[in-house]
Amino acid sequence: MKRHDQTPTPLPAIQAAHVDNNNQPLTTNQGVKIADNQHSLKIGLRGPTALEDFILREKITHFDHERIPERVVHARGSAAHGYFECYKALTEFTMAAPFSEDGKCTPVFARFSTVAGERGSADTVRDVRGFAVKFYTDEGNWDLVGNNIPVFFIQDAMKFPDLVHAVKAEPHNAIPQASSAHDTFWDFVSLMPESTHMLLWQMSDRAIPRSYRTMQGFGVHTFRLVNAQGQSVFCKFHWTPMAGTHSLVWDEAAKIIGVDPDFHRRDLWEAIAAEAFPEYELGLQIFTEETANSFSFDVLDPTKLIPEEWVPITPVGKMVLNRNPDNFFAETEQVAFCTAHVVPGIDFSNDPLLQGRIHSYIDTQISRLGGANFHEIPINKPLAPVHNNQRDGMHRHEIHSGRVNYEPNSLAGGCPFQTAMSGYKSYPEPIAADKVRGSPELFSDHYSQARLFWQSQSPAEQTHIISAFRFELTRVQTLAIRMRVLSLLVNVDGQLAESVAKGLGIAVPPPMPLASTAPIPSYPISPALSLLSH
Ligand code: HEM
């Protein structure tokens, strides 16, 4: 597809699913015309309603089942259609379809989200933001499921359910967190020194973006690119908003939560409606395995980023969001992103967080979207043709004919066949190792990059971080948890810890032991503290 073709038209599967109800006779789901849509069928005008009123029952039954489960995380989101335009072919590094030709355009659907809040929660809370992009490539769907912060809280997928349980509303009373501040979250992260770097980002202005249009996006993990010769390099993905990266300040964010909880949703919608199309440049940090081995940290550790001074970011293309969805539920709610959706030329690294994600998304979507056939929902349908022997299941739409649904077979004459040359091949990374649990020694430095981030901030930004820690920690009622957070911060910067402690009215405790194997200090669990303000 060339650039001039980029008029904002719906994807074919969505177009095919469109229904024009305008000036049509009202019918039941069986196509029977309805004579009276105002009154149920009664035994006498003042009598009981007849059980046989199939029209009433169908209408109410359907209504009763209108809601589906919200996403376990990232439930609150907004999305838009658009396209990705590749500046220059990247065939030296990857055979991935979106990068195969100069100027090539690929349709995309991008969804931005908060992480912790429920579907109806406010937009401008202090939280990480999701930045997920589905590329409808001619070689199949590729999903780049990222966040607006380049690192993550934890290093291993094993810890993700605990992190999310700690972040979400407490289970006994379901009181949602107020902007990520409640005891369980801070309890968990203070016992998880690897989260320190992410905490610094989360307390920074990055966690209260001005708009989805002014937010960066990051693939976070190290990925692999593979070219047609089978050669591979490592890669990190970065989205940069063309409108610049802008944040709110906390007072604005807090007021907007009350005045316009849909602030980001409205902003994205109205910008696209007014043809002020949001644009984001995609940049890649490309590096070899040898370069990776020279770093002081492990590129498989998702709590680390690669400084741009070490590996510069090469701009490779741009995404333009130029069409609002026609139907929030059908598109934004039913879209199913998954890190397992890769195309030839894109491959995984062994990052243990990424490895767990490859399983999690399809698994959760089977229950969220009601069975194994959600790839047939129009927003999830690839542009590339789908042919296989997968059959049946809940809500199957496609109809395959014939008696043969297996391979190999000698009966069908022409069934789908594997393509050794152009099919997806995993990069044959040589691995010889013991099967063990644990993490590499290089994963254990939890503070150097947190310190680098702190030092990279301007004095005003540092003040915002201090205020954010104070604000959040004043809402933590258990003194021992506040002390543990401070003991993490001492390892980042003494002045930072001192300033936060001062706002809390407590003395700075000794630093958290640096060795990840050392026991985490225990502070006496004190009675609940009153909520202080700063
Ligand atoms: C959504 C799991 C880490 C970005 C989700 C969902 C699950 C999940 C179950 C809901 C999906 C759905 O219902 O469609 C996990 C697990 C992780 C992990 C198990 C770690 C082991 C991450 C990380 C990032 C991320 C590190 C960012 C790089 C997202 C985004 C969404 C999401 C953007 C929302 C996608 C959308 O807009 O529909 N995640 N996640 N997740 N996750 Fe993760």
Image: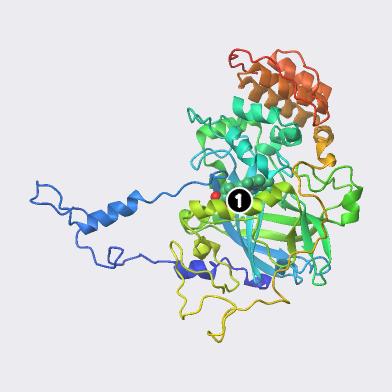
> In the orientation shown, which residue stands out farthest toward the bottom?
413
Let me know if residue 79 appears in the view: no
Residue 475 vs 431, above or below: the answer is: above
Residue 478 locus on image (x, y percent): 62, 18
Q: Amino acid at mark 1?
A: Ser
Would you say 432 lies left or right of 166 here? Answer: right
Give the residue drawn at x 81%, y 40%.
Answer: 443
In the picture, residue 7 is in which quadrant?
A: bottom right
Let me know if residue 252 appears in the view: yes
How packed is label 1: few (under 14 Cα within 10 Å), some, or many (20 or more)?
some
Q: Which quadrant does the C terminus fall into?
A: top right
Q: Nearer the viewer, residue 9 or 473?
A: 473
Residue 390 vs 351, above or below: the answer is: below
* Ligand 1 within 8 Å of the CB at mark 1: yes
Give the residue drawn at x 61%, y 16%.
Answer: 532
Residue 514 locus on image (x, y percent): 83, 28
Count of marks overlaid on the render: 1
* Residue assigned mark 1: 360
Q: Which quadrant does the N terminus fall into?
A: bottom right
Residue 132 locus on image (x, y percent): 63, 53
Give the residue drawn at x 78%, y 44%.
Answer: 301
Q: Nearer the viewer, residue 179 or 168?
A: 168
